[in-house]
Amino acid sequence: MQELRRQDIQSFIKKHEKEDPVSLVLSASKFPSLPIQLIAAQIKSRQKAITKLPSLYKIPDVIFPHGVSMEQCSSEATARYKAQLVEERDSLTDLSGGFGIDTYFFSQRVKKTIHVEKNPELSQLALSNYKALNAEITCIHNSAENYLKNEKTAAKVYYIDPARRDENNKKVFALSDCQPDLTKILPEIEKRNAKLIVKLSPMLDIEQAMNQLNSVNEIHTVSVDNECKELLFIITKEPRPVTFHTINLLKNGGTQLFLFSKKEEEEVPSFSMPSNYLYEPNASIMKAGGFNSISNKLGLTKLHRNSHLYSSPEIIPNFPGRSFKILKQIALNKKKLKAEIPSMKANLTVRNYPQDVSNIRKKTGLKEGGQLYIFATTLMDGTNTGILCEKIN
């Protein structure tokens, strides 16, 4: 990887970084003095970094990892969010440093940062990149388990993003199968009376993860433009009820934030038929299961126990999700749709309905697109219907 810092290679990358990496590999014979496969992999990673890690992309001397390391590293948006979860007076140790994106953004916030990584190539890459970024981070090539055994001074905060693949690159789901093994890490952290931030896959079941972790105080479901990217579990020894923090980071720089507790989620919501406005919570709320809390806290009514769509007679400003003006209820058959939507174009969403999107489109001939939205859903009286809407935000 260090070879990529050669001036001739850097110049070649800048000249060709908008080209197809596969085409470059196929034309390798034209550049016999250059490691084209390595260069093509770096170009592919840089093309991802333009949107995923924009500030690092602008630094010429930063080298990006290839393959899984680049795919699975945090985005800049989520890394910046995580940095807000620690205090300036804290010291922090990242026990699964990897490429080091999270470590870097944590270091912008705390007074002392340590990057621990057992892969020697990634550890060296992180070290050289931190020098290019003028970041004061100590890099240690070691496993998390061995590091904790020999640690001289405990940190205030530990962060871990365990690899969720086994030696054969197959996905694993039990925390004991992750690398590092969280079931071995947790007792070591408990001895130190420190805060632990655990990043897990958004595909994991939250309740199952909570049962495997001890003393969870906060759960953060983090989305970027309504796509859930990360689950964060904050663990301390302070006994307090679990709080769910749902965050949706928007392209325009805004943030949708909604908090609720387990007790609040147990409160029964109100139900009604569709009124004037329709609401669909964002992906973070849906993942966290804040179905009753969003209704009760914002004064909305649910359309059905399992539909997770909401309504109100007056508009709720800054709703954490999508908001729509209801035009009318509509039967989802070709004749009725054609009468209401001559173009036969509408954006279709299915929530608790006996048919899926592809089936409805096939039966009705409804095409994707346009300015209208249809929610195929079940109402509180058991009626299956379509709700025709115009989007507000």
Image: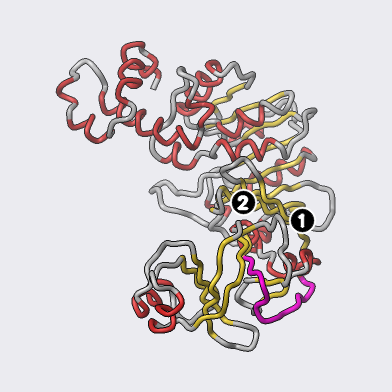
Which kind of residue does numbered mark 1 sit on?
Answer: Thr
| Residue at left offset 36%, top offset 12% | 6
| Residue at left offset 77%, top offset 33% | 87
Q: Which color scheme did the rendering employ for the protein?
A: secondary structure
Q: Which residue is mark 1?
A: 243
Looking at the rendering, which quadrant does residue 351 occupy? bottom right
Which corner quadrant holds the C terminus?
A: bottom right
Q: Which residue is mark 2?
A: 231
| Residue at left offset 66%, top offset 34% | 148
Q: CA distance from mark 1 to mark 2?
A: 13 Å
Looking at the rendering, which quadrant does residue 195 occupy? top right
Describe the element under mark 2 as helix, strand or loop.
strand
**Residue nearer the viewer, 122 or 275:** 275
Please, what is the dominant secondary structure of the magenta stretch? Answer: loop
The residue range painted magenta reads: 266-279
Instruction: Tell me: residue 113, above or below residue 86.
Output: above
Instruction: Tell me: residue 112, above or below residue 48.
Output: above
Determine whether, in the image, residue 315 is placed left or right of residue 56: right
| Residue at left offset 57%, top offset 77% | 328
**Residue nearer the viewer, 174 or 223:** 223
Q: Position of residue 5 (x, y in %)?
A: 39, 15
Looking at the rendering, which quadrant does residue 272 occupy? bottom right
> Hey, which residue is sitting farthest top in the picture?
7
> Hey, which residue is sitting farthest left in the picture?
29
Q: How many marks?
A: 2
